[in-house]
Every structure is written in structure tokens, then in C-alpha cells.
Image: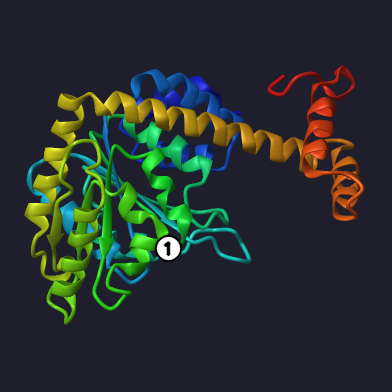
Amino acid sequence: MVTVDDILLQLQGPNRRALPRLATLVENGDPVGLEALDALYSLSGQAHVVGVTGPPGAGKSTLVAALLGRIREGGRRVAVVAVDPSSPLSGGAVLGDRIRMMDRHADDGVFVRSMASRGRQGGLAWATAGLVHLLDAVGYPLILIETVGTGQDGTDIASLADTVVVVEAPGLGDGVQAIKSGLLEVGDIVVINKADQPGAEDAQRLIRSSFGLAHPRDGRTVPILPTIATAESGISELLTAIEDHNVWLTESGQRSVRRERGARAEVLSGLRSVLDRRLESGPGRSPELAALIARVARRDLSPRNAVNALIVALDSPATGGPIGN
């Protein structure tokens, strides 16, 4: 049986498969993997975590692949977590993002991992944060997270990333949908990709005016950059903007503010996960939950009183004591 000490020892050796194996354990919620992550957690907090989000079709994967090339030219190690829509049948990740980046598979300075969103529209399963902490702890100074970026939940990336890059493209509503969904509210940098296509200037103008009408966020101007990822045009400017924002985070004190906000979101997300598991699959839980839901549906019980009844049941000695025990 593999122990936590075995895993930590393997990570220090030359075995290139040790990290992917541990990443799989963490993603699957394996107790040994999670214990190893707990042991490594104090080493995290050093990486610059960059979220790349936006609507499907904006060219996020191509943009990330182009960024990878430019980052590696500078000699820096980089990791990519591509959060894909879950397969409706298997729950596994659609590996399109990973396939596009496979030309980097022989580069020791690049780690690419594709993981499933597990059904959440925003694509940020709790396991995503665990994987980011793992990559941070083992020494990747820059971590890129590419998210599904659909719907309001696409803004979840703001709780995990230090820097959020929102990618838009002409022909996808000219930025209107991004404004409605709230993506632009969390963007530290906005990219108009496919800038060689008709409507690109109009999209850039619309988004720039939307920022002009809004209140300045965190006392800085959000850069709006045109790129053509397929031709690697504008990639150097984007990388410079990412690095400038990283410096600003330190100088303004916003890094600690954002990380405390992220820690809160992660702890609450984990708490919800534990509650879901205990209520849905714990011994004797499902009948009680089903009965309460049925009473709420019949209007015999209000939702608030149903929640209170569940909390009392979870805290009672007969059901194992307080949450977390």
C-alpha cells in the first residue's frame, strides 16, 4: 500500500510520473492524495496563478498555447490546468485543450493537466483548487487555469486566480454577453482575440466604453488588448500585462486581500461538498432528506425550517456529532 511518505519521497526523485499520479489522487479525492496535499500545503502560496476565461469559441486554448511558448522562451517553468466540460456519461474531461498542447509533452518545464468540471457550469470544482495548490507547492512559479467560462459561474475563477484574463472575440455578441454575465467585472485584463476578424474594433470599443462608464476597480485601469493567437500576435504584450499586474498585486497589497477572499471561498466550497456527501450518501441520511424535500414541495414546511431541521440532525450525537467530526 502506497503511503503519504512514499508519495512525498517520489516527488523529490527523478520519476516524472510521480506528479501526475499525485494529481490524479488529489483530483479523485483519494485520502492518501489529500493527506499528501495537506503535508505540502505550507509550501504553496509562491506561484502567480492566472485564470483565463471567456465564452466558448473565443480562442482561449490557442491563446494559452501561445502564452506557453512565450513563457518558455524566457526559461520559466509553467503549469496549465485546463478545466473542461464534464462528459455527461462518464464525468471525465473532454481532452481537447490537452490535445492542443501536446506538442509540449517532452518539455520538462511544462505541466499540462486537463480535468473535468464535474457538472459545475463555471468549471471550478473544489478539486481544481487542490491541484493548483499542489503545482504551487512543487515549484511551478506560474500556473495558468483555463476555464469553461459559461454563464454567471464563469466568474468563479476570481476566487482562485491572482490575475484574471477575460478573453472575448468578435462575432460572440461583441462583448455584450460578457458584460451581462459579469465576466468583465472580474477581469484584470481583457483580451479581444481574433483581432483580424470583422467587428474586432467595434468589440474593443464597446468593452472600453463599458469600463469607462463603470467605477474604477481597485484603483487601476484594466488593459484591453487585441491579439491574434493563431499568429501569436499580441502575445508578448499580453504577457507583459500579466507580469505588470503581478507587480501591482504586491505593491498595492491586493495579493493578500485576494488570497484571503479565495481561502474563504475554498473553505466554504469544501464545507458545501462535505454537507452534500453527508446528506446524499450518509447512512440513513437520504430518507430523511427526501422526506423533508417532499414536505417543502407540499408546502407543509418552509425551506428555512427544513434547513434548520437538517442542521439539528447533523449536529446531534446520534448522527456522529458536529460537521467535520
Quarter of the image where one finds residue 302: top right
Disc 1 crowd rating (10 Å Cα; few below 14, some 14-19, many 20+) is some
Q: Residue at x 82, y 36 (%)?
A: 305
- Front residue (pair 193, 309): 309
Number of marks in picture:
1
Q: Residue at x 30, y 65 (%)?
A: 100
Q: Could you tell me which secondary element the residue under label 1 belongs to?
A: loop
Given the image, on which type of amino acid does mark 1 rest?
Leu
Q: Is residue 76 visible?
A: no
- Front residue (pair 99, 44): 44
Q: Quick check: 106 left or right of 294? A: left
Residue 280 position, x and y percent, is 78, 43
Residue 288 position, x and y percent, is 89, 40
Q: Quick check: 317 left or right of 185? A: right
Q: Residue at x 11, y 57 (%)?
A: 235
Q: Residue at x 14, y 51 (%)?
A: 223
Quarter of the image with the C terminus in it: top right
Q: Quick check: 188 left or right of 76? A: right
Residue 268 position, x and y percent, is 56, 32
Residue projecting furthest to the bottom? 198
Give the answer, above or below, for where 14 lies relative to 170: above
Residue 27 position, x and y percent, is 51, 42
Q: Which residue is mark 1?
A: 95
Q: Quick check: 274 left or right of 261? A: right
Q: Is residue 266 visible?
A: yes
Quarter of the image with the N terminus in it: top right
